Each structure stands twice: as structure tokens, then as C-alpha cells.
């Protein structure tokens, strides 16, 4: 086991009855992690078409996707995210197919007025990084 392994879905900081909006879902995502989030919140994750206020965001990102799309998706997700709601980008771990460069995520986040916090391992094959608005980078996860 790696020392960076976290509590999986609990790492995201979502709570009971939270509405978690999921972006860029595909058939390669970690279903166990998704089910863990649904178990914590007691609700299914909602997709990109959800037009209410989300209590949290999970954005699945893989290398090879258009970098500009990442920034655009961050902006779109921000439009429905509630104030102070956790915002996570989840990407394959280094060495796995689709592993994204941290610089890609940092650049996209910076262009959207967001800071990237320290990555954590959220499952066997996926890492998560939390985004926070500029000026809030010292917040706890």
C-alpha cells in the first residue's frame, strides 16, 4: 500500500444528502469510488446536464483530452457549484493509461481562478486534486 492512500470516497468531504455533480464520466471511471460517494451522500451522482446547485463536483480527467476542454469544463462546473462546495479533479495515477500531467491541471485551474491542492490517492488507479478559489489555497481538504 502507498502511504498516500486515503479514505477513498470519504476523502472528497461530501456529506449526507449532498448533490454531487459528475463531469466527463466515461466507462473507465472507478465505479467503486462512485458507489462510495453515493453511499456517503445517500443520493446518486448527477450528470453534466443537472441545472441546480451542486454541493460538490467530481471531474474525471484523462491525458489526451483537449486541455482547453478542461478549463472550459471547470468554468461550466463552477457555474452550478455551490459556494464552498468541494471541487475535485480525478485523474489516473502516474504510470496508468490516461495519467494527466499535473502541469495541465494546474494551468487550466489557474486560468479559471483556482488553486490546486496536494493530490491524494482516492482509489487503486485514480488520484484526486481539490480545486479552491484563489485566496483559499490554505483551506483544509
Image: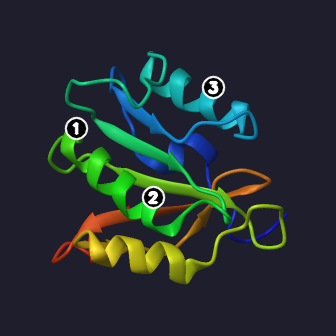
Secondary element under disc 1, as helix, strand or loop, is helix
Instruction: Work out whether mark 1 precedes mark 3 in sequence or the reverse, and give the earlier one.
Output: 3
Q: Residue at x 24, y 49 (%)?
A: 78
> Where residue 6 sits: x, y (%)?
63, 57
The N terminus sits in image quarter:
bottom right
**How far apart in space, not on screen, are marks 1 and 2 (Cα)?**
17 Å
The vertical placement of 3 against 6, above or below, is below
Q: Residue at x 22, y 38 (%)?
A: 80
> Where residue 98 sits: x, y (%)?
75, 61
Instruction: Work out whether mark 2 precedes mark 3 in sequence or the reverse, and give the earlier one.
Output: 3
Judge from the rendering whether residue 79 lies leftward or rightward of residue 126; answer left or right: left
Secondary element under disc 3, as helix, strand or loop, is helix
> Where residue 24 sits: x, y (%)?
54, 42
The vertical placement of 141 against 52, above or below, is below
Q: Nearer the viewer, mark 1 or mark 2?
A: 2
- The quadrant where residue 106 appears: bottom left
Residue corresponding to mark 3 = 35
> Where residue 26 sits: x, y (%)?
66, 36
In terms of depth relative to the viewer, which is nearer, 44 or 106? 106
Q: Residue reaching furthest top?
A: 43
Residue corresponding to mark 2 = 69
Give the crowd class for mark 3: few <14, some 14-19, many >=20 residues within 10 Å.
some
The vertical placement of 30 against 106, above or below, is above
**How far apart in space, not on screen, are marks 1 and 3 (Cα)?**
22 Å
The mark found on residue 80 in the picture is: 1
Whether tag 2 and tag 3 are in contact, CB under 8 A, the answer is: no
Judge from the rendering whether residue 32 lies leftward or rightward of residue 60; answer left or right: right
Q: Residue at x 36, y 64 (%)?
A: 131
Amino acid at each position: 500500500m502507498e502511504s498516500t492512500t486515503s479514505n477513498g470516497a470519504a476523502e472528497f468531504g461530501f456529506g449526507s444528502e449532498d448533490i454531487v455533480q459528475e463531469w466527463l464520466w466515461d466507462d473507465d471511471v472507478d465505479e467503486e469510488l462512485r458507489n462510495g460517494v453515493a453511499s456517503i451522500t445517500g443520493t446518486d451522482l448527477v450528470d453534466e446536464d443537472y441545472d441546480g446547485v451542486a454541493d460538490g463536483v467530481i471531474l474525471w480527467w484523462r491525458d489526451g483530452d483537449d486541455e482547453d476542454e478542461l478549463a472550459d469544463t471547470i468554468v461550466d462546473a463552477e457555474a452550478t457549484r455551490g459556494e464552498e462546495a468541494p471541487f475535485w479533479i480525478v485523474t489516473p495515477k502516474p504510470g496508468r493509461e490516461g495519467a494527466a500531467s499535473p502541469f495541465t491541471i494546474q494551468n487550466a485551474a489557474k486560468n479559471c481562478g483556482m488553486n490546486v491542492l496536494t493530490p491524494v490517492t482516492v482509489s487503486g488507479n485514480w488520484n484526486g486534486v481539490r480545486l479552491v478559489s484563489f485566496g483559499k489555497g490554505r483551506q483544509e481538504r
